Amino acid sequence: MKKIIVALDGHAGCGKSSTAKIVSKELGYVYIDTGAMYRAVTFHFLENKINLENLDDVESELAKITVGFDKNPETGAIEVTLNGERVEAHIRTMEVTNNVSNVSAIKSVRTFLVAEQQKMGIEKGIVMDGRDIGTVVFPTAELKVFMTADVEERARRRQIEMESKGLTASFEEIVENLKERDHIDSTREESPLRKADDALVLDTTNLKFDDQVKQIVDWANALI
Ligand code: C5P
């Protein structure tokens, strides 16, 4: 059977990752969460107090790290790694979330991670989610989906997700963070978030989770 690349882009917190995870299972594909890669780099920069204004420091720090994925033997989930260590437990905090859009606006960070992402797609059969997958990482992806949803609905879902992980943040704080990230992501110079001309739009504000998964699987199956 023909293998394709499914590129899933869109606004912050509209369910891209959870949708992509199930879509990849249904298609028997590998799922790659590129947001987790930007978060892992952000976590590393925060831990090592890297000054983001100093681009030489940023570049020499990037030369020291590797970002990849590995299976968590306890849960079976595929998680992001930083220098071979799984760091999922550290990358969803408000501190990382509040800094990740500034880190991902840096050109050398994007060049570094985009090269890794392109290697992961060489054999196709992947579902990759992010902000620039259909426009920059895989501009020739067979299926491109641009996901969006009303910001308050996104915040409501994000708060439930954070609470389930034992993380706390107020509704207002989450709304502000989502708006701020969308603003930085859409207005940055380097690969801004935008819908690829040939992407299909999926507004999930009033969709049930299973229905948004089914829609993407149906689109993919029509191409395979
Ligand atoms: O997907 P997630 O919300 O975890 O992504 C975190 C941040 O990483 C985004 O707000 C964006 O700034 C950045 N990102 C990006 N390009 C990608 C994936 C994520 O700039 N392909």
Image: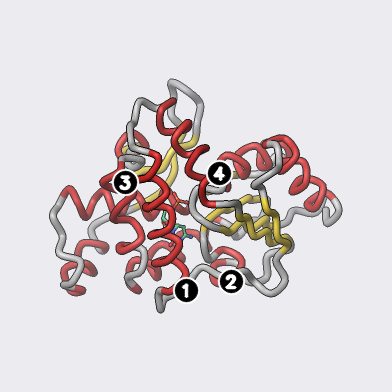
94 horizontally vs 211: left or right: left
Asked if marks 3 and 4 touch (Cβ < 8 Å), the reply is no
Mark 2 or mark 1, earlier in chain: 2
Sooner in the amino-acid sequence: mark 3 or mark 4: 3
Asked if ligand 1 lies within 8 A of label 1, the reply is yes
- Local SS, label 1: loop
Q: What percent of the width, then of the height, locates residue 99?
A: 28, 55
Q: Amino acid at mark 2?
A: Thr
Q: Residue at x 68, y 58 (%)?
A: 145
Q: Residue at x 73, y 62 (%)?
A: 200
Q: Which label sits on residue 82?
A: 3
At a point 49% along the width and 59% down the height, the residue shown is 117
Q: Residues within 10 Å of mark 3 (few under 14, many from 20)?
A: some
> N-terminal of the two: label 3 or label 2?
3
Q: Using the numbered discs, state the Cα–Cα distance from disc 4 to disc 2 in whole angstroms.
A: 26 Å
Say which residue label 2 marks: 135
Q: Which mark is in front, 4 or 1?
A: 4
Residue type of the residue flagged with mark 1: Ser
Examine the rendered structure and indicate whether residue 6 appears above or below residue 84: below
